[in-house]
Image: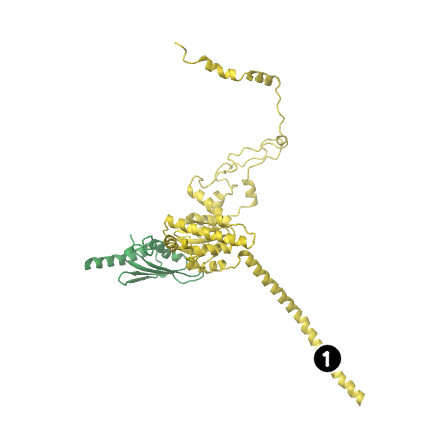
Chain colours: A green, B yellow
Amino acid sequence: MPIPISVITTFRTTFNPFSQASRPCRLFLSLLRTPNTVPGGASFIDIKVNQLPRNSTQEPTMTIGFKGGKELTLEVGKRGLKIGDVVEEVSRVGRQLEREASLKG
Amino acid sequence: MPPRLQISSLRRPALRCPYELQIIRKASTAAVTPAAPIEQMTRSPAPISRSPPTQPPSHRNPEYRRSQLLRQYTSILRTSPLMVLFQHNNLKSMEWASIRRELTKALEKVDEKIAAEGRTSPALAPYIKVQTVQTSIFEVALRIVEHFRPTEAALASGKPPSAVDPITQTSAELPILSGSRDDPALTHDLSRAAYEAVKHLKGRHELADVLVGPIAILSIPAVSPEHMKAALSILTPKESGFRAPTRKANPDYHEPIVQIGLQKLNLLAARVDGQILDLNQTKWVGGIEGGMDGLRSQLVTALQSMGSSLTNTLEGAGKSLYFTMESRRSVLEEEQKPEGEKSESS
């Protein structure tokens, strides 16, 4: 399932790299940080990563901002999401936005 | 028709070596067997091992790339006590190349600075490398390095056999299994013994959760916080908090290709002498001034001040006792004096 990189504008994530629940955050980060999304690239994404200390028990979360101001906050740790689920949710929103844009003409 | 094969050409070799026949005749008349070397007379030759000592049979197939990667990673882990882990996200080869160039430059500067200060630590810059790793293989290598401790007996039996008794030629008998790749005597990293020893620890290493996704390591072959600080100031200046070189000092560092590459690097963790450190602890290690020598001098001053304070404490009890007794004596003397004076006067 492709990630709608062109409609994503911001990405904020908080995770503790020593916990297993942070896997989807880090993998999604590696999917977003492509040569196209760097400053000056075709579709720039503003990425901010906040790493927690090792003994922190805070659950990992991520917030994805889309074009048009829509924001999607995923409680990755609480819901026990995996990278496939995250990609699915994000691409669902991406498809909605693309459809609205096509209806507007 | 002349013969196709020139007869003269056949004869020529014989003519070239006219002494050959003579030599053969001499050798046949005076055939002396050379004496066996002393080594051979006192010790019998070792029983023949089926595999050369440098290439023991291995449980993991040595022809596979993953086996050789495992050997490479165990070697890196054993030789570099200081290691920093990064997440790298889709860096292009040119970005890697330019980042490595900047890193080497910064590390050479550190070496020059250490040499200028007159310290005797060897130059490390040519040995500090950034490389990407296969996470699953790297995790196995970590487990093998940290948890596989072959016993002395196993190490000794793994060595090529040497004969002891000079009478029988193969006195030290090879075990039946030897020559097979599952020989329990073999204790190298690709052996079955290593595999069995760490199998039950799968996914239970501290770094197992960190080793997910694209990972790169920076390996430093000595615990040198100065080199680590220089490397982190180049690779992750924002996350580690160490200042990157200014645009004036190093204009190459501020080229877009380097900067774009660096945005895709994340500092994750570090491994110092087998200890796993997170981001803040890594910053702390990098912040040690003057490297290991500086740390040692700090320790010395701490110990010295502690010694003086300890002597003060120990002296304190005696001193206070002394002062108490002295004051008591003076009080008593004063009490006695007026009485004496009184008695004398009355």
Q: What residue does disc 1 label?
A: B330
Q: Nearer the viewer, residue B286 or A92?
A: B286
Whole-percent x, y for residue A94 in the image: 27, 57
Task: Using the image, determine if residue B44 lies above or below residue B280.
Answer: above
Whole-percent x, y for residue B220 in the image: 49, 51
Left or right for B119, reference A75: right
Q: In which quadrant of the rendered image does the N terminus of chain B lie? A: top left
Whole-percent x, y for residue B26 in the image: 60, 17
Q: Residue at x 28, y 56 (%)?
A: A6
Q: Nearer the viewer, residue B119 or B130?
A: B119
Q: In which quadrant of the rendered image does the C terminus of chain B lie? A: bottom right
Residue B25 seen from this side: yes
- Direction bottom: furthest residue: B346
Left or right for B33, reference A79: right
Residue B273 seen from this side: no
Other residues around mark 1 within 10 Å, as few (<14) / some (14–19) / many (≥20): few
Q: Nearer the viewer, residue B8 or A34?
A: B8
Left or right for B197, reference A50: right
- Direction front: furthest residue: B248
- Element class at badge 1: helix
Question: Mark 1 belongs to which amino acid?
Answer: Ser
Quadrant of the rendered image containing residue B294 = bottom right
- Direction top: furthest residue: B1
Q: Residue at x 72, y 79 (%)?
A: B330
Chain containing mark 1: B
Total labels: the figure holds: 1
Q: Nearer the viewer, residue B233 or A49?
A: B233
